[in-house]
Image (cartoon, rainbow, N blue to C red):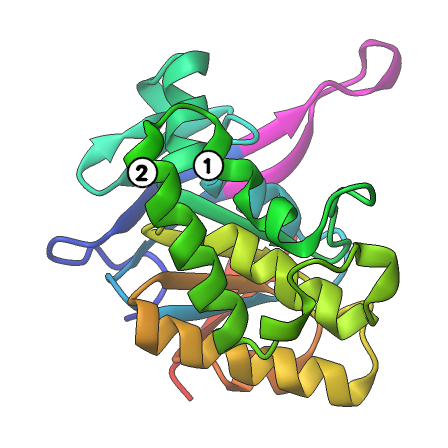
């Protein structure tokens, strides 16, 4: 389905999203997003591509509730998240959305296992923490890091650190995984490994995946590619 299509029962639906920032010295507002609308089905994989400054990362931040649109609505699992207050948004970010960035943002003083478990520390009883511990070890084994649980980030390669970041993003079993240039800081071999891993985890864990990327190799692995230019979608393909 292309940009602007209203899907039946989508996981995520954007309707006429705009975003602008105040211009310098009282100048006219600077538009970044210009009426973006699209839907994403549950379990779908989507790449958002386009030149620098086209609005990709701003859009991803709005999808992840890290920023609010100037106008328009974002519906996640039949709930208008643009109407939520800050505490409600924080709960959505923690429980329903996972994030992977170009920089892994791991805590250098913590072990691999401790880094993965950080998102589980907000609330939860002893039983749920034990379940998270078991799930973390399962996922780390799945991404080839079963023998790295006690290592710290400085003892890992760049590709290994990014795999830890992916597991951390999945630890609370989110409905939606957002990745902003996840392979951008990796060498070619590590980037290919991570790209394949994201596709496999989408299939195995059932998480919906949206990737902002300059990598055509990564984009081609997604089920749909949306191209942005000047704050709008200009092309939508299903490879």
Q: Position of residue 92 (x, y in %)?
A: 37, 31
Location of residue 106 with respect to 22 vertically, above or below:
below
Distance from disc 1 to disc 2, alpha carbons, whole Å, reads: 9 Å
Q: Which of 168 and 233 is in front in this view?
A: 168
Q: In this view, does 78 lie to the left or right of 134?
A: left
Query: Is residue 177 at least partly visible in the picture?
Result: no
> Which of the 4 image quadrants contains residue 130?
top left
Residue plotted at (45% across, 23% down): 90
Q: Which of 9 and 115 is in front in this view?
A: 115
Q: Position of residue 154 (x, y in %)?
A: 88, 58
Report which residue position mark 2 lands on: 128
Q: Which type of secondary structure does the marked residue at label 1 adopt?
A: helix
Report which residue position mark 1 lands on: 120
Is residue 148 rendered magenta in the image? no
Residue plotted at (31% across, 38% down): 128
Task: Single out the mark in the foreground, 1 or 2.
Answer: 2
Q: Where is residue 60 in the image (x, y as percent from the top left)?
A: 55, 47
> Which residues, given as a range, are shown in magenta?
19-34
Q: Is residue 187 left or right of residue 161?
A: right
> Which of the 4 image quadrants contains residue 14?
top left
Location of residue 210 with respect to 16 vertically, above or below:
below
Q: Where is residue 161 in the image (x, y as percent from the top left)?
A: 74, 63
Q: Which type of secondary structure does the marked residue at label 2 adopt?
A: helix
Label 2 near label 1: C-beta < 8 Å?
yes
For disc 1, the neighbor class at 10 Å (few under 14, some 14 to 19, many from 20) is some
Location of residue 65 with respect to 105 vertically, above or below:
above
Where the N terminus falls, by quadrant?
A: bottom left
> Which of the 4 image quadrants contains residue 239?
bottom left
Name which of mark 1 and mark 2 comes first in the sequence. Answer: 1
């Amino acid at each position: 389905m292309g940009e602007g299509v209203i899907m039946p029962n989508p996981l995520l639906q954007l309707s006429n999203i705009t975003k602008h920032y105040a211009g310098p010295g009282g100048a006219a507002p600077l538009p970044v997003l210009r009426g973006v609308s699209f839907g994403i089905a549950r379990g779908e994989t989507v790449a958002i591509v386009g030149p620098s400054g086209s609005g990709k990362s701003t859009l991803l931040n709005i999808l992840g509730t890290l920023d609010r649109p100037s106008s328009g609505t974002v519906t996640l699992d039949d709930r208008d998240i643009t109407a939520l207050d800050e505490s409600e948004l924080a709960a959505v970010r923690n429980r329903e959305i996972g994030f992977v960035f170009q920089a892994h943002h791991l805590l250098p003083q913590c072990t691999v296992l401790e880094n993965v478990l950080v998102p589980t520390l907000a609330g939860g009883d002893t039983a749920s923490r034990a379940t998270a511990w078991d799930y973390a070890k399962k996922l780390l084994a799945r991404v080839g890091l079963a023998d790295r649980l006690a290592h710290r980030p400085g003892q890992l390669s760049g590709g290994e650190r990014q795999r830890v970041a992916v597991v951390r993003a999945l630890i609370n079993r989110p409905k939606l995984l957002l990745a902003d240039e996840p392979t951008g800081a990796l060498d070619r071999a590590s980037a290919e490994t991570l790209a394949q891993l994201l596709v496999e985890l989408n299939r195995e864990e059932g998480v919906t995946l949206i990737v902002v990327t300059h990598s055509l190799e990564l984009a081609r692995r997604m089920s749909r590619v949306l191209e942005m230019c000047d704050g709008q979608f200009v092309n939508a393909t299903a490879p």
